[in-house]
Image: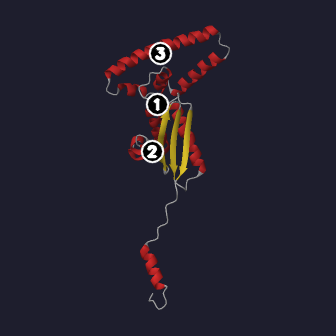
Amino acid sequence: MNDDDLAERMRRIEALLDDDAGPRAVELAETLLDLYGEALSRVMAVVSAAGGGLPERVASDELVSHLLLLHGLHPLDARTRVEQAVERTLGQTLGQTAGQTAGQMAGQTAGRLDGAGVEVLAVEDDVVRLLVRRPREGCGSSARTLRSALEEAVRDAAPEIDRVEVEIEQSAPPPVVIPVESLLRASSRDRPGARA
């Protein structure tokens, strides 16, 4: 079953529950959710006992990750999932060229995209705060696109988060530096009788 098939089945389940599903149908769905939630809990207990990064590998599958989140069984905390989502978003946007992983490009809590640095400032309660530092010459539409991509990635990775705050900070232009030597040479040439 591919991702499109899974998405279609999820839409069908939601439609069935929304379209005048009687109380018994809703009760049946809730009972099934509880049942497979308990089964997942037992599987994750065995997987966790095995160690060696196995829980994280199991949770790296997108569908399994969503089911683990639904039942409060995900092995990674919200901050780690948010950091990884930022990392993946940067990697996907950059195309991960030259064999670099998103981790090599982005780092654990910060990354760079089109000259922009992205930092996870806070993951507290139901709010995630991100800071995007952009160079002065960037265009507004790329900032909006980046904001949207980051918000979507965070919401997918941490559905328990209610609000994603993305602050876009334009970096100041670099200061103009005039070498002292050029000022001294220019002032001596400007003196009357001075040789050029």
The image shows residue 45, relative to residue 56, as above or below, that is: above
- State the SS at label 3: helix
How far from the left and from the top, in percent, is residue 134? 52, 51
The image shows residue 195, relative to residue 77, as above or below, that is: below
Mark seen at residue 78: 1
Sequence-earlier tag: 1 or 3:
3
Q: Residues within 10 Å of mark 3 (few under 14, many from 20)?
A: some
* Label pair 2/3, CB-CB below 8 angstroms: no
Residue type indicated by callout 2 = Gly
How far from the left and from the top, in percent, is residue 184? 44, 79
- Apparent side of residue 127 relative to residue 75 in the rendered image (left or right): right
How far from the left and from the top, in percent, is residue 137? 55, 56
Q: Which residue is mark 2?
A: 111
- Give the residue drawn at x 37%, y 18%: 45
Sequence-earlier tag: 2 or 1:
1
Q: Residue placed farthest to the right in the image? A: 20
Mark seen at residue 172: none
